[in-house]
Image (cartoon, rainbow, N blue to C red):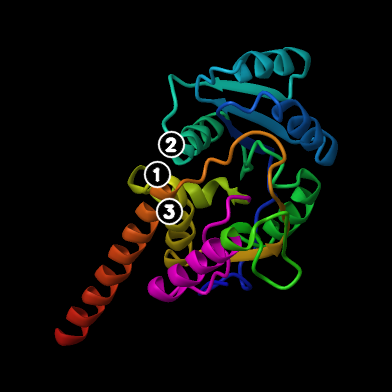
Amino acid sequence: MSHSGQQRRYEPLGTVLVIIPTYNEADNIQSVVGRVRSAVPEAHVLIADDNSPDGTGKIADELAADDEHIQVLHRRGKEGLGVAYLAGFKWGIEHGYGVLVEMDADGSHQPEELPRLLTALKGADLALGSRWVPGGRIVNWPKHREFISRGGSTYSRLLLDVPIRDLTGGYRAFRKETLEGLGMDAVASQGYCFQVDLAHRAYRAGYHVVEVPITFVERERGDSKMSRDIFAEALWRVTAWGVSRRVKKLLGHRHT
């Protein structure tokens, strides 16, 4: 799904870093990290903890002390998912990782599906775990959540004119070179906007983006990080991007 992709020869992937941002995930982090280590034993894990008051950071430190494949990035406080991922990406690139993976801490992204994303990435620049392509599923979601998420992706896709079915999903594997080419400092870092902006930028830059069907499982423990404010901000920003793009296109036509 790009303007190129099939003709290119791709370099070997290199070492994989799975970035797992946490805020109050003490109930979930040990299980998820254990599943990642079982699913892709050669991968490394970076837990990016936003100074969780429930002791998630301490649990993360204990996991790292027992396993040299696990690292912890302690952050000052809660700044949001996008900011945590951007810090994780920078850390991973600085430490020489070839692939950087986004994964939720709550088990909604199944680590057992990571090998499929990595296999797809061997012939792509970015592999997206997708709920809305054939074979993708969601489990335990109320209908209104599905409507909001599916509708948000469809709205973003149409307005931004990007043929990606799941623009808002957060289970993704990037080649290091893709992230370096996207200009991360300019990426909108809040909520759903972060995921939409990264995928949109990758497609616009001509990177080869593939969608891999995943089964998204609603968290069983803890609170969802999704809020009405985050969704409203995403809607507003996507609308602004879409309108701006159309205005530029219109002005471009007038000058030709």
**120 lies above or below 115:** below
Q: Tell me the magenta residue range.
A: 146-171
**Callout 3–callout 1 Cβ contact below 8 Å:** no
Q: Say whether disc 3 or disc 1 marks the residue closer to the N-terminus.
A: 1
Q: Residue at x 64, y 22 (%)?
A: 71
Q: Amino acid at mark 3?
A: Phe
| Location of residue 196 in the rendering, given as x and y in whole percent from the top left corner | 46, 58
| Residue located 56% across and 66% down the image | 147
The Cα–Cα distance between marks 3 and 1, rounded to whole angstroms, is 13 Å
Q: How many marks?
A: 3
Percent x, y for residue 11? 66, 53
Q: Is mark 1 in CB contact (under 8 Å) with mark 2? A: yes
Instruction: Give x and y (percent) for residue 29.
Output: 70, 28
Identify the residue at image location x=42%, y=53%: 193
Q: Kindly give the residue lying farthest to the left in the view shown.
A: 255
The type of residue carrying mark 2 is Val
For the residues labelled 2 and 3, say whether their Cβ atoms are less than 8 Å apart. Answer: no
What residue would you read off at disc 3?
Answer: 231
Residue ID for mark 1: 189
Pointer 3 local density, CA inside 10 Å: few below 14, some 14–19, many at least 20: some
Q: As rendered, which of 86 and 50 lies closer to the eye?
A: 50
Q: Which residue is mark 2?
A: 83
